[in-house]
Amino acid sequence: MAKYKLKVNGKMMEAEVDPTTPVLWVLRDHLNLVGTKYGCGVGSCGACTIHLNGKAMKSCQLPVAAVAAQEITTIEGLSESGEHPVQKAWLSLDVAQCGYCQTGQIMAASALLKSKPHPTDEEIETAMNGNICRCGTYVRIKQAIQSAAKNAHQ
Amino acid sequence: MENISTNNSRRSFLKITSLTGGGMMIGFSWLANLIPNEALAEITAPKEWVELTGFIKITADNDITIFCPNPEFGTNVMTSLPMMVAEELEADWKKIKVEMGDYDTPRFKSQFTGGSRAMNMAWVPLRTAGATARMLLLQAAANEWNVSVSELTANNSYVSHKASNKSVTYGALAAAAAKLPKPEKVSLKKISDFTLLGTPQKNVVGKKIVSGNPLFTLDYKQEGMLIAMVIHPPAFGMKLKSFDGTAAKKMAGIQDVFEIQVYKDGYTRAGFDTRAFNNLVAVVGKTTWEVINARKKVQVEWEPMATYTESVAGRGGKKMETIPGGLESTDEHLAQMNEMQKKPGKILRKDGDPEAAFAKAKKILERTYSAPFLSHNPMEPISCVAHITDEKAFFVAPIQIPEMMKQNIIANLDIPAEKIEMKLARMGGGFGRRAYGHYIIEAGLISKKVKAPVKLIYTREDDMTNGIYRPTYMVSFKAAIDENNQVTALHIKGGGIPENSIHENRFPAGSIENYVAEGWDIPSNITIGAFRAPRSNFIASAEQSFLDELAETIGKDPIDFRIELLQKAKTKPVGKNNEYDAARYIGVLELVKQKSNWSPSNNKNRGVAAYFCHSSYAAHVVEVSIKDGQPQVENVVTAMDCGFVVNPEGAKNMVEGAVVDGIGNALYGGMRFEKGVPMQKNLNQYRIIRHKETPKKIDVHFVQNTIDPTGLGEPPFPPVFAALANALYKATGKRLYNQPYLKELTKS
């Protein structure tokens, strides 16, 4: 057990956990940020995607001890009240079915648009390929990313 | 207008009451004949109503809440069912709040998510509830203004009197309306008068989903809640012998390690009580990561499970079922199924004289198809919250049909029905898996033991290796062709582990003069369950692949050939009990033909398939390409007939998802077993379709009609497999018979 000071969504937060604890479980069990989801625990599904220093990262594969001063952003911190262009595009395309994977999808998509404001279809597919949606909403996810890219730069 | 009796309609029951502080609530259920009279007594405290499965709540401030009775696992019932209420209520949809109803044991029997039934079951009762409320509000205004109801209009949550230019909110009328006697009859709107139903409406939970709000069981928290996990045998056919939790118990945060027996000895298992492993080791601690780690330190010994029998209450009444011991393997399963194909099966249906037709045949086409066990892998792994105290048994449960769990909870947790309180959490996917709520009992047993609220969490590995799979199947189709290139007989024979694969009364039965269907099954200790139309999805893949090859053999266009058969079934059906409407079947084929510009010059890499199951009709045209030997679905054109389309936006989304899911399962899906051990344990070993493999475009079209709506959860899924296989044949020249298709396609 050790105390960790983490910068999460712009705020300093503290958790006393084992150093091997994945950030996923620190967020969910200790910091009460449950928008980051558990899907597989082996980095294969992307439901746990967060931003680490602005880059998409699977939080189930990130031990808390490795975070140090790096900034964590979760879905709860992506925008004040669900108004991020990617979230808005998700709503306007009515993407979700069960909705469980969508926060991870949105975190992956928003990280992509940060690094590539105008991604090609292929770049979208490559960047998003680590995020599974069992309901199969991929067509709408891609449209939403394209739409967010367009709207953010009008 | 359609007149609906609010008293006598078998499926309709309404209950009206005042809210303290003004307003009214209307409760409804569609199994009124099962509800005792005391339920009609007025209840004034709103708290009493919170447990109802479905109702309208109107406050004095004109806030209108509609409760969704059915558990939500992604088919968007939380939007489409309240739309039915709001249409008849003449309420302002933009201001409606929707909430999920809790489970209510004594009153409501129809919180049913499964079988693609929500739309059809709710269609009359929910509109009746809305219309009744509207009538009461109109009557209250009529009384207030001393005019007749016929002079009033209800619109956008207001009642207006045109002649006097008066207008009042529903909220202002609600308290008075709640005191009025329930109207004996209400009128339902004509479809042509709908202003909300039939228009595309967005998911009412959308904002909460994209904001990451706590909606799911795994997100639930309460004071003092502990985390629990269970350890189950590593193989089907094994059981718990002994365990030692000493080391685990010493670890930080760990509270207890103990054995639970899920179902009591002698318990009569009902249809949705399936579970593979009855004795589990539970590990309970403060946090998830601590429990995950402690679990690895529990020393467990397993031993072979002997063949046993248990009492099962199924559709055909109570019977004893034998579950065989032994460690099963996929290769042996295939050998066993091939062996069964050689022996006579049980004749399920016979029309005409198939033996004579085959004896006379000029040509015979026979093909055999197979498919593996499939795992549901819903994105949210299995979970359940339970807090069992002397006062009540509280659950937060992701469960498709909560009512089906009642007897199980009563029997195995020793809890009387009236103490069960269950919140129906949004489910992170289901696909049939969450109809089987053994995890509710497991969570309950653990809570009882540790005397605290617990959240039971299955890891992905626990979930994938726990059973309740789509069965593995095999079937052969054999057709007799005469000298005029006519199909004169069809012989279907197949089975599965552990259930038969045949739907003997479905198309092409009814369209072929001489027909025989026979089936068999092989018992297994690997458990199975519902899976987005199990059996239908396999038999459709085989049947629709076979019809494609048969059409080619006799030199016919695959769509024309199907329509030709269906015309026969329409005008002169063969045999009895044909389970489909040939005209509607033809309808989707014609629509998909038109929308896909189906023609020989366009069809180089395209395949078609159609199917009818769970009350809706589906046809797909799939176009593929092959890049570096790997298949890619380029685009899909779909035609659906699900009757009147309640919410076209949600409906399209459902169909797109089913198409993607079908492609993924057809190409990659499959569990393998070696000596009872599941070889796929996580999503890095079980391939799920991803962004890159998704079609570029999915074009969904609906047959426009005013038939009562039916569902879309299942029907678009089964025909995807064969449409894909038939397209891959066109692109590669290779017919595919065994799933997953990618394996067969890339096999040299």
Image: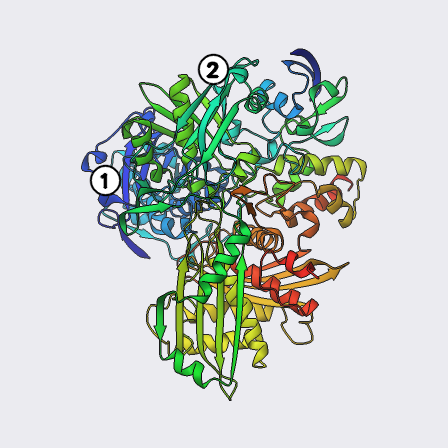
**Residue sitting at x 34%, y 52%:** B188
Disc 2 chain ID: B
Q: Amino acid at mark 2?
A: Gly
Q: Give the residue number, with chain letter if any, for mark 2.
A: B224
Answer with left or right where residue B631 lies relative to residue B705. Answer: right
Residue type (three-letter) at the residue carrying disc 1: Ile
- Asked whether the viewer can see residue B570, the reply is no
Rendered view: B142 above or below A10: below
Q: Is residue B113 left or right of residue A151?
A: left
The image position of residue B326, as x and y in percent, is: 45, 44
Percent of width and height locating residue B651: 52, 52
Q: Check disc 1 and report its element: helix, strand or loop.
A: loop
**Disc 1 marks which residue?**
B35
- Name the secondary structure under disc 2: loop
Q: Nearer the viewer, mark 1 or mark 2?
A: 2
- Please tell me which residue is depicted at 64% across the width and 41% down the height of the picture: A90
At 37% across and 54% down in the image, what residue appears? Answer: B189
> Residue at 68% across / 52% down in the picture?
B693
Q: Is residue B461 above or below residue B647?
A: above
The x, y position of residue B232, in whole percent, is 48, 32
In space, the residues marked 1 and 2 are separated at their CA atoms by 37 Å
Q: Residue B56 placed where, x, y %?
A: 37, 37
Chain to which mark 1 belongs: B
Q: Residues within 10 Å of mark 1 (few under 14, many from 20)?
A: some
